[in-house]
Image: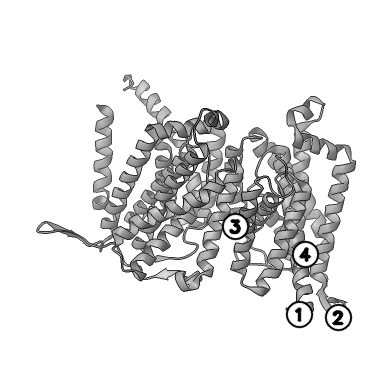
């Protein structure tokens, strides 16, 4: 592969990695604070993409304004779901997973009913290319990388330096202990769902400017998101980022060398092999 | 006595079903319901040891391809292929089971879901063996059963396939019942209730978990092999991820705690959408509604609801409990 081709694949890998990380961070937040594997997280991402589609393509709103509105709306949806569906099943994996599976079906049916099953797309506001070292890099992909990593930095600052962020860390380490210190678990759970669903909506809105969107797009994102958090270490935010980067690069670079099927197989095989030797993931601890 | 009577009545009803059912489409639906019973019950067998896999679709896919290829490339008899496919799937489940069962709870579930996806990807990629995304076509049906001088079953009608799947399901349920009531079943529930306690009292928890996974997957492989002989085609996504999820739904909505649960769940949830056939696109919605209602209002599932209704009715009628 030529140098230019390699840089192109690297950019593709980082773009996918940015999307995977946004999805994985939401999953890992909800998992570590509420003890729930949010199977319908992929559908939240899909709903975000459709909201942005309607605002950009139908209402003609600005791309970034649409993403911000969609993020707030979907974050609100997250708070609603936490209150109505997940609060009673916190820390009960079997039943919360079944609830999440039914939410998956509900969201898919609703979107299928409203928007129809055929793939839709909207243009990225960023056309054209940037020339770096004589290699053409598409702006619409660079934007995704930049937005993704900017959000990542903001989230880390929030968790490290704010009281609410520290409360989240405390709950993920020891729920009962945190409650005894006066941390409001219900509030922080709702906050985690708001942030997690909001990040998924951003990821969905961004991916829609690159690929077409469909009601079943969520299962792919969910698979990749779960793969990232398992690879990196469950409940670990830096682990989710590392996992997202590794899988993004595998999915960005390998398809140009072999086929997409083989790239998918390598991704899953990597996770299984790593779990054999480190069941807690790369960054996780017992 | 009453129980034996109702069992005989149920068996007789199942046997004469194809004679009274109007048209091949209904028999096809009954065949699917039978397959779902076998899948949901074998999933419950694995869940007895405290782990819920999402690899059942993948295991059925492997069984289907294995049986199809054994028949078409090696020319083996359909019955031998069916058995070898089941055993092959059990072997694969044992091999992947050893690393998988070390992961607990939800993590086990997720990794098995990945395994199911890997099966689909492998079937799509390995074109020389599996025919790629198009799958395998023209799979021969089961070999005829000839009893000289009496009758011949050549599997030319759907009713004959129905009796075959009825037989397979009966054997499957008998096996699962026997395992559950045996010492092995007790060990499974011990591991489910207190993993570390079971281990410290000398039980090989890893070995028993792998055993449960392999035994449940064996039946999934048999169902897959049957399906490929019945439909005479198999594609990589014939048993996709949603198919596996539906199997889980049959088990949870039916009632995970009782033996009858997955059976009732599979029957009700396979046949009810057919009643509302004109609203086919709403089937997922219907599934979700039943599932949410069960989780929130009937924690012991359709089986528990049925049991309580029977009690309530017999109390109203002034009968004594059997």
User: Which is closer to the viewer, label 3 or label 4?
Assistant: 4
Residue depicted at x 75% and y 59%: A245
Looking at the image, tell me whether mark 3 or mark 4 is earlier in sequence order: 4
Q: Earlier in the sequence, mark 4 or mark 2?
A: 4
> Which residue is identified by label 2?
A134
Q: Residues within 10 Å of mark 4 (few under 14, many from 20)?
A: many
Name the residue at 75% across, 32% down: A174
Q: Residues within 10 Å of mark 1 (few under 14, many from 20)?
A: few
In the rendered image, the vertical position of residue A92 relative to residue B157, given as above or below: above
Q: Are marks 4 and 2 on the same chain?
A: yes
* Front position in the image: B134 or B214: B214
**Residue named by callout 1:** A2
Looking at the image, is A161 positioned above or below residue B35?
A: above
Which image quadrant is residue B221 in? bottom left
**Pointer 4 residue:** A14
Which chain contains the residue that carries disc 1? A
Q: Earlier in the sequence, mark 1 or mark 3?
A: 1
Q: Secondary structure at mark 2?
A: loop
Q: Quadrant of the C terminus of chain A?
A: top right
Residue B25, quarter of picture: bottom left
Q: Position of residue A95 (x, y in %)?
A: 58, 38
Which residue occupies the extreme right position in the image? A161
Relative image position of residue A159 (x, y in whole percent) = 85, 43
Expressed as whole percent of the image width and height from the top left, the position of residue B259 reads 40, 36
Dot placed on the residue nearer the N-terminal end, 4 or 1: 1
For the rendered model, the colour scheme is: one colour
Q: Are marks 1 and 3 in contact (CB under 8 Å)?
A: no
User: What is the C-alpha distance between the residues marked 4 and 2?
Assistant: 19 Å
């Amino acid at each position: 592969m030529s140098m230019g081709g390699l840089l192109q694949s690297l950019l593709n890998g980082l773009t996918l990695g940015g999307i995977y990380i946004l999805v994985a961070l939401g999953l890992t937040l909800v998992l570590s604070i509420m003890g729930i594997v949010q199977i319908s997280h992929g559908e939240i991402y899909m709903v975000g993409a459709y909201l942005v589609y309607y605002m950009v393509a139908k209402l003609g709103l600005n791309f970034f304004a649409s993403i911000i509105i969609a993020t707030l709306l979907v974050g609100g949806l997250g708070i609603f779901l936490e209150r109505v569906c997940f609060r009673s099943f916190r820390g009960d994996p079997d039943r919360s997973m079944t609830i999440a599976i039914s939410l998956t079906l509900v969201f898919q049916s609703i979107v299928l009913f409203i928007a129809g099953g055929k793939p839709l797309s909207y243009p990225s506001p960023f056309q054209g290319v940037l020339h770096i070292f004589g290699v053409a890099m598409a702006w619409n992909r660079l934007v995704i990388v930049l937005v993704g990593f900017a959000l990542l930095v903001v989230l880390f600052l929030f968790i490290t330096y704010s009281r609410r962020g520290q409360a989240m860390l405390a709950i993920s380490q020891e729920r009962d202990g945190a409650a005894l210190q006066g941390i409001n678990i219900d509030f922080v759970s709702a906050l985690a769902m708001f942030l997690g669903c909001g990040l998924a909506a951003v990821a969905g809105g961004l991916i829609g400017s690159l690929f077409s969107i469909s009601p079943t797009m969520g299962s792919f994102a969910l698979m990749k998101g779960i793969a990232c958090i398992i690879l990196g270490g469950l409940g670990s935010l830096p682990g989710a980022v590392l996992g997202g980067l590794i899988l993004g690069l595998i999915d960005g670079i390998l398809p140009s060398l072999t086929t997409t099927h083989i790239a998918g197989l390598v991704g899953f095989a990597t996770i299984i092999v790593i779990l054999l030797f480190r069941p807690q993931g790369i960054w996780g601890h017992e | 006595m009453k129980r034996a009577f109702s069992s005989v009545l149920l068996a007789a009803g199942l046997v004469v079903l194809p004679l009274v059912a109007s048209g091949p489409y209904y028999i096809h639906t009954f065949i699917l319901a039978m397959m779902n019973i076998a899948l949901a019950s074998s999933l419950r067998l694995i869940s007895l040891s405290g782990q819920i896999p999402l690899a059942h679709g993948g295991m059925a896919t492997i069984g289907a391809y294995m049986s199809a290829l054994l028949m078409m490339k090696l020319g083996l008899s359909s019955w031998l292929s069916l058995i070898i496919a089941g055993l092959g799937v059990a072997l694969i489940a044992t091999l992947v089971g050893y690393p998988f069962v070390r992961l607990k709870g939800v993590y086990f579930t997720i990794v098995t879901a990945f395994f199911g996806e890997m099966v689909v990807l492998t079937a799509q990629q390995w074109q020389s063996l599996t025919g790629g995304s198009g799958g395998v076509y023209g799979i021969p049906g089961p070999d005829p059963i000839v009893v000289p001088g009496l009758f011949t079953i050549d599997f030319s009608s759907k009713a004959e396939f129905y009796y075959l799947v009825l037989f397979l399901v009966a054997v499957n349920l008998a096996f699962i019942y026997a395992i559950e009531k045996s010492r092995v079943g007790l060990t499974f529930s011990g591991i489910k209730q207190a993993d570390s306690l079971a281990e410290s009292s000398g039980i090989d928890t890893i070995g028993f978990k792998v055993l449960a996974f392999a035994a449940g997957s064996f039946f999934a492989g048999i169902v897959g092999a049957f399906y490929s002989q019945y439909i005479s085609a198999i594609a990589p996504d014939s048993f996709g991820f949603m198919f596996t999820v539906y199997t889980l739904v049959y088990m949870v909505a039916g009632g995970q705690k009782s033996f009858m649960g997955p059976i009732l769940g599979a029957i009700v949830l396979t046949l009810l959408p057919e009643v509302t056939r004109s609203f086919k696109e709403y089937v997922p919605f219907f599934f979700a509604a039943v599932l949410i209602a069960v989780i929130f209002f009937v924690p012991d599932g359709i089986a528990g609801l049925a049991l309580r209704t029977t009690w309530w009715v017999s109390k109203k009628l002034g009968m004594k409990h059997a």
